Image: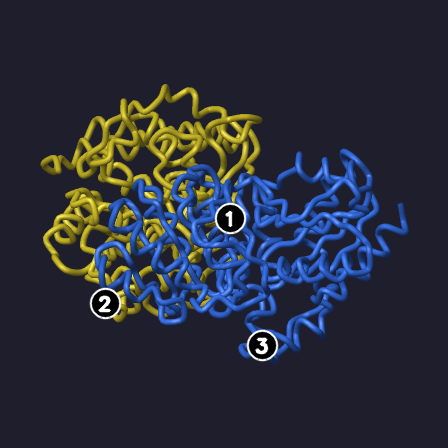
Chain colours: A yellow, B blue
Amino acid sequence: MKPFNKKELEVLAARIRLETLKVIHSRGFGHVGGSMDLADLMAVLYGAVMNYDVKDPRWPDRDWLVLSKGHAGPVAYATFGLMGFYPLEEAYTLNHPHTRFPSHTDRKLTPGVDLTTGSLGQGVSTATGAALGNRIDGRQNHVFCVIGDGEADEGQVWEGLHFACAHKLDNIVYFIDNNGYQLDGPTADILPHSSLAAKAEAFGLYTQEIDGHDVAAIYQAIVNAYAKKGMPSCIVLDTCKGKGATFAEVNHEHSSQPKEDAWAEALAAAEKALAEAEKA
Amino acid sequence: MSFTLIGKHEKDPRASRDALALTLNEMMAADPSICYVDCDLMGCINTKQLRKNYPDRAFEAGIAEANGAGIAAGLAATGKKVFFHSFGTFSSRRCYDQIYMSAAYAGLTVHVLGSDAGVTAAFNGGTHMPLEDAGMYLSIPESTVLDPCDYVQLESVTRQLPGITRGVTFTRFVRKDVIQVYGDGSRFEIGKGVVLHASDRDVCTVIASGIMVDEALKAWEQLQAEGVSVRVIDMFTWKPLDEALLLQAAHETGAIVTAENHNVTCGLGSAVANCLAKNRPTPQEFVGVQDLFGQVGPQSFLMDEYGLRAANIVEAVKKAAARK
């Protein structure tokens, strides 16, 4: 892990937000809400925490990222482009025919994507299997798995967590993106979860709940997770779905297809936010 | 491929599952990259020994097949050669999307094992009777689908599975009693059907797999006694199907009967018919479960009930040959 640098990570998060918008704008519509709310996490992971080699994306000792909420693909494509896995402009082909950047993350197509996701719940199991495989090989790396709060409706999420606890996998950290919304509306109106943190804790995970937009809190929670031995970790990120996208952070929609003037406004606001972060 | 045909319709004294369990035990000793994941059914197929002998590579996923399939795919992503087992119903229907997306679509190879093929689920009944398992796997791109007929053949294919590194594989097998068709030491090649009887007087070809191979051999004897000559092929390799052998048989005998311990809507007969329709339209009759659900009972009762007997094959041969 690199030492914590608040300004650097906040600037990176702002840059990721701007680029995520540009990636989705290249197609005109997409999963803005659940991508934008992960920008701060992605900034901490790729800016300070994870070991990876952009020239060798399958380096066996790398840290893994599994977006089990696979529809957050655009935030990954923006981040990986910024980190240098490929020229960022390539990601401006999102969902075009034969693109390497599909809606949902695909390990066969995109450098930097470790596992294929999209059918919700499944990334939790595959990420857990990868952590198990890394442990068999005696590697010191970590797997980071991002779960949506709506996704937590899937029973498979809990099967995966159960397995990780039973096998005492302390080389995996699960994040739950607790933004309170899913496709049909607020999670409270679809299948209320009560407390996701309490549930994760009851399963046997070392659980923390933090502000998912506070880079310092995210960094510290990962430090704490690394220090906890003999059990997997869960970090519940309280987030705002659509954070930083002017048209999406109001209604927290799952998928957005704004008109061009709304895109222009959102892109300008994200540019401004980046400039302010750089000035701070 | 090299084999000896025993074909005396006698039960193998060995439990079929041991062809898998003992062979895997040997293979795991020789290859540290082989992993095994089971869903609380190790006790049924004698693989508890794997967990005992290789505790860091043989895992219980518990009664959670969806997660078990995902764990297997995740292990594969770290370079492991992974075997994944449950009863055939549960390693197909219960975790189909997981195998499809997390493994096959993602380009990760998992070797799926489905025990209690078709009516051999017998006393576990219709809820546990996989009659569409192999059909589901046939429809996954890049897959390999196998229905071995006896101990020796199951052992031979098990040894070959780790060599398959593209696509998922599905092997359905019988847990306990099987008729010994082949002599020990017989070796088979995935993608190559096995010609058990052939002559230049054959008026039809019976293409069978799994427990239907012995029934096909009995049908051959009965037809011989009636002066009717037929070809018999063991097509344990549903996918890749041995199309060259099939088309040669269609050309030389002019009629086809398929015999499978599976629903005829989506199985060996369908795969054969696809190939024939495209290349050489040939009269074909389908022996198998005729789009029905499974039910409980002794295997012998179920084979009678669903028409999975030599007599059904004999009748189908006459019908197919008459359609030429």
Measured in 3D between alpha carbons, the distance from the residue under mark 3 to the one under mark 2, in whole angstroms, is 37 Å
**In this picture, is B156 found above or below A15?**
below
Of circles 3 and 2, which is in front? 3
Q: Position of residue A30 (x, y in %)?
A: 51, 38
Q: Position of residue B160 (x, y in %)?
A: 42, 44
| Res B163 quadrant in image | top left
Give the label on residue B268, or none.
Answer: none
Disc 3: host chain? B
Q: Residue at x 30, y 29 (%)?
A: A57
**In this picture, is A268 found above or below A211?**
above
Q: Secondary structure at mark 2?
A: loop
Of circles 1 and 3, which is in front? 3
Q: Amino acid at mark 3?
A: Gly
Q: Residue at x 76, y 66 (%)?
A: B311
Quickly name the residue at label 3: B125
Q: Amino acid at mark 1?
A: Tyr
Is B37 on the left-hand or right-hand side of A132? Answer: right
Between discs 1 and 3, the one toward the N terminus? 1
> Viewer-proximal residue, A51 or A175?
A51
Give the class, few, some or many, for how many residues have Cα within 10 Å of label 1's Cα (few <14, many ≥20): many
**In this picture, is B205 found above or below A111?**
below
Q: Is residue A124 visible?
A: no
